Image: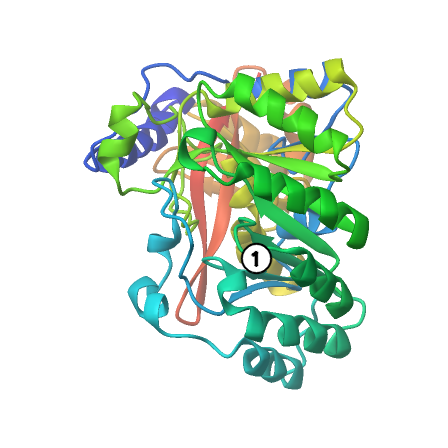
Amino acid sequence: MDIRKYAEIFEANEREFEASIEEFGVLFEREESSPRLRREQVGRTCACHCENGGSSVWRGWISTACRACRTGEQTASLFVDLRCTKDCYFCFNCNQPHYEHFRVHKRNISLELDQAHAAGAKLRCLAVTGGEPLLNKDQVLPFLAHAKKLYPATHLRLYTNGDLLDEETLEELASSGLDEIRFSVKPLDFDDNQEHVFAMMERAATVLPDVVVEVPVIPDSVDELESLMRRANSIGVRGINLLEFCFPLHKTEEFLRRGFELRKHPYKYPYQYRYSGGIPIARSEKEALRLMEFAVAENLRMGVHYCSADNRISAQVNLQNKMFSHDGRLRRQWPWMDADEDDHFLRCAKAFGGGAADVREWAERAGSIPYSYDADVPSIAIPRSLASDAMKACPKASFGESVSVLEREGDIICMREITVRELA
């Protein structure tokens, strides 16, 4: 089997996944509207940072919490319940475990934090989210103050749509030790309370360290978002997160009515991610990158961050794969693999077909090259760092880059290959 036939196995898996998602009623676009290489192009032309495997593009400033979110280490998000003052068609809270239960029941988040602290949990970043957290202000304010006592150095943030904010509450939040308030701003056609929210943003900027706006980039909303960015910048907002817009696998009629399609190749690498936010919508990333260019053209002072769906699944990948770096037994079991520090996936180089035997002979002659030979394919896996040498020594062999994740099945840890892409 040559590399193209081998790669077709993974491409078929991706097509099968897309077909299963289309059963929810929204179809995939025929051609990808924003190839991922465009992220790096915008990063270069706009002098932006392009990080986390290219999934996070930002300029000027980025929240401490956004950096921590990439790995998911020493971070936590807690909610009291999942009630909200709004009913957004794109909300993905319905995908949360026990959603209906937490619509009517509350958690004791202070007790949960005490239990985590007693168990020795370390926290760099801690968030209170919802629903709308300020529906439970009587729990949230004491929790924030308590969290700051237990974890004085921890970055505390609160998510809110702003509906229930007033000046007194902002002062109370500031007194509690809150480091960041993050306003989830809704589209104009879905929110008649934006003037109040902007007033609260402006006031928050005078009493809290960081004010952040978070907004989904809904296709065909560029003009509206440009206006939002100008205004947020003018009132002292520290940064804005432009979120890739997603279909949460419900309220299909709302997405169809607006003519939305799903993004072809929704994730950089196909896999069963646990992210509850849904499937990326076509053209959202394309327009988000246009807004990054707009921020440069307008010379906005505030930080601007494009957070793709790829960026939001990176914590899962890191938490699954980090044991490879920490456990010498795993590295000895798969010595041809390496952990990519940029996007957290595990990788190796592979040669296929008749050339695989040539590469094995080359590795044997060298005497110290770790490899794994699969006679059934045939293929051979070697360290990526040796791919260039192997290509020179075996010019007839076709090479690809293999991408994998670790999975735990009971007490057994398995290496699961999720794609192979041809190396030039």
The residue under the point 43% across, 67% down is: 81
Height in image: 293 above or below 372? above
Q: Nearer the viewer, residue 59 or 171?
A: 171
What's under tag 1, amino acid-wise? Answer: Leu
Q: Nearer the viewer, residue 291 or 395?
A: 291
Please indicate whether residue 25 sits to the left or right of residue 287 in the image: left
The residue under the point 52% across, 50% down is: 163
How far from the left and from the top, in percent, is residue 142?
A: 65, 76
Please indicate whether residue 127 sits to the left or right of residue 304 in the image: left
Query: Where, quadrant-wise, is the C terminus in this rendering?
Result: top right
Query: Where, quadrant-wise, is the N terminus in this rendering?
Result: top left
Q: Nearer the viewer, residue 231 or 372?
A: 231
How far from the left and from the top, in percent, is residue 158?
A: 62, 58
How far from the left and from the top, in percent, is residue 78?
A: 54, 66
Please indicate whether residue 310 sits to the left or right of residue 417 in the image: right
Tell me, yes or no, if residue 70 can be seen here: no
Q: Check disc 1 and report the residue beneath it.
A: 319
Height in image: 235 above or below 74? above
